[in-house]
Image (cartoon, rainbow, N blue to C red):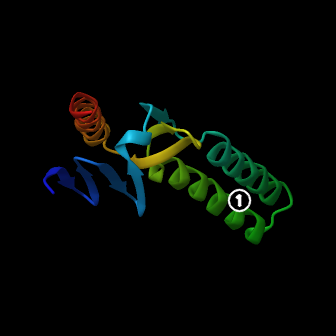
Amino acid sequence: MENAFNERGVTITRNGLSAAGQVFALRDIRSTRIMTVQKNKALPLTLSLIGLAGTVAGGIFRSGAGLTLGVMMIVVGVLTWYTQDIAHRLIVDTPAGEREALSSPDLEFVQRVNQVLQQAIENLAARI
């Protein structure tokens, strides 16, 4: 059995796709698509606004604890924003429905996997 692709835990052979502990038979894959999931804006913004409110309340009531906790919440909100990654997901359509086969912050890797997978599906169709 010859591997068409074997990188970062993703293996595509003549008969199947194995990624993230899942195995998909090539004959069952109807189509593939890449979906990009952007950063979550609501959580960091909410944390920072709560922190801002706590900082203002701590300043108004001359509370060192309120001021400190408010500043800490602002910092947590900013760090939450900067530590999030944009995720690129490879979605495969099978008779059982659409499933996520692969998720990675590296778009080029996901595109390369999709390209090799499409070629493997075309080669399987030519053999049949």
Q: Quadrant of the N terminus?
A: bottom left
Q: Residue furthest bottom?
A: 65
Residue 118 lies, in percent from the top left, at: 29, 31
Looking at the image, residue 33 sits to the left or right of residue 125; the answer is right
**Residue 76 position (above or below residue 118):** below
The quarter holding residue 107 reads: top left
Q: Is residue 34 above or below residue 15?
A: above
Tell me where residue 114 sits by quadrant: top left
Instruction: Tell me if I can see residue 7 in this picture.
Output: yes
Q: Residue at x 71, y 59 (%)?
A: 70
- In what quadrant of the picture does the C terminus appear? top left
Q: Position of residue 61 (x, y in %)?
A: 86, 60
Residue 62: x percent and y percent?
81, 63
| Residue 7 % position (x, y) | 20, 55
Q: Which residue is located at x 24 percent, y 37 percent?
A: 120
**Outermost residue, left side:** 2
Q: Who is closer to the viewer here, 73 or 62?
A: 73
Residue at image location 77% in from the left, 56% down from the top: 54
Structural crowding at the residue carrying mark 1, measured as other residues with C-alpha within 10 Å and reported as few (<14), some (14–19) or many (≥20): many
Q: Nearer the viewer, residue 124 or 69?
A: 124
Give the answer, above or below, for where 67 lies relative to 128. below
Q: Nearer the viewer, residue 95 or 69?
A: 95
Q: Amino acid at mark 1?
A: Gly
Q: Choose between 25 and 42: the one closer to the eye.
A: 25
Q: Which residue is mark 1?
A: 70
Residue at 51% across / 55% down in the picture?
A: 79
Residue 99 in the figure: left or right of residue 17: right
Identify the element where label 1 is drawn.
helix
**Residue 75 quadrant:** bottom right
Q: Is residue 89 visible?
A: no
Task: Determine the residue located farthest toward the right in the rendered image.
Answer: 61
Q: Is residue 78 left or right of residue 19?
A: right
